[in-house]
């Protein structure tokens, strides 16, 4: 994502400082992302996409959009992204296609909440536990999900995830990212 963010920002004539102000992120953090020293979480990527007025996929993929096409990501070609700050890893499960609003990811949450900030973003989130167990912390309530369990919630509700048990949890996460429009 580092090269793509810088290219998009420069193409749009946006300075790091302006992007920091618009996205609510710090200039130093954005610089680290552009240099490949940090990988943003899903909610941070959504903030960056909104600030740049692009689909979040454009931050990760520079392939041209195909209005009539589909996205196929083979299991052996899922780009795995690590978030060194928080210990989570995730893989994109779709490429940019048209003007779609669903963003599917495969998420491997860390085993500890330590250093993991609560996230919130516009839209909805759907979690399906593919492997292992996961704890979803909603500030004042925690939910433990086991393999095969699913959870759907308003993504503006503060949340964070962690793997629980012996095995690394693996989740299918689908984010609906379309912002509400006002008339």
Image (spheres, rainbow, N blue to C red):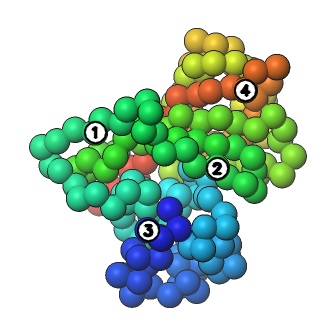
Q: Earlier in the sequence, mark 4 or mark 1?
A: 1
Residue at the spot of label 3: 4
Is 85 positioned to the left or the right of 31 in the image?
Answer: right
Q: Earlier in the sequence, mark 4 or mark 3?
A: 3
Residue at the spot of label 4: 168
In space, the residues marked 1 and 2 are separated at their CA atoms by 22 Å
Give percent across and percent down for residue 85: 75, 56
Is 94 positioned to the left or the right of 63 in the image?
Answer: right
Q: Earlier in the sequence, mark 3 or mark 2?
A: 3
What is the secondary structure assignment of the residue under circle 2? strand
Question: Where is the C terminus found, in terms of image quarters?
Answer: bottom left
Identify the residue at image location x=60%, y=74%: 35
Identify the residue at image location x=68%, y=14%: 146
Relative to 132, does residue 174 appear above or below in the rendering?
below
In space, the residues marked 3 and 2 are separated at their CA atoms by 16 Å
In space, the residues marked 2 and 4 are separated at their CA atoms by 14 Å
How dense is the environment of label 4, judged by Cα within 10 Å: few (below 14), some, or many (20 and up)? some
How dense is the environment of label 1, judged by Cα within 10 Å: few (below 14), some, or many (20 and up)? few
Give percent across and percent down for residue 171: 59, 28
Residue at far front of view:
76
Q: Earlier in the sequence, mark 2 or mark 4?
A: 2
In space, the residues marked 1 and 3 are separated at their CA atoms by 19 Å
What is the secondary structure assignment of the residue under circle 4? loop
Residue at the spot of label 2: 82
Identify the residue at image location x=62%, y=78%: 31
């Amino acid at each position: 994502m580092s090269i793509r963010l810088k290219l998009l920002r420069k193409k749009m004539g946006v300075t790091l400082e302006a992007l920091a102000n618009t996205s609510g992120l710090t200039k130093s953090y954005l610089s680290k992302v552009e240099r490949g020293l940090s990988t943003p979480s899903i909610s941070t990527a959504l903030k960056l996409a909104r600030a740049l007025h692009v689909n979040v996929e454009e931050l990760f993929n520079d392939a041209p959009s195909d209005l009539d096409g589909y996205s196929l990501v083979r299991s052996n070609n899922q780009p795995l992204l690590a978030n060194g700050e928080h210990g989570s890893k995730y893989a994109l499960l779709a490429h940019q296609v048209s003007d779609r609003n669903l963003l599917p990811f495969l998420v491997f949450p860390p085993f500890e909440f330590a250093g993991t900030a609560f996230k919130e973003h516009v839209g909805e989130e759907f979690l399906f536990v593919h492997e292992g167990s996961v704890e979803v912390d909603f500030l004042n309530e925690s939910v433990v999900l086991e393999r095969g369990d699913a959870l759907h919630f308003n993504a503006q509700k503060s949340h964070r995830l962690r793997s629980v048990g012996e095995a690394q949890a693996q989740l299918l996460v689908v984010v609906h990212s379309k912002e509400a429009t006002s008339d």
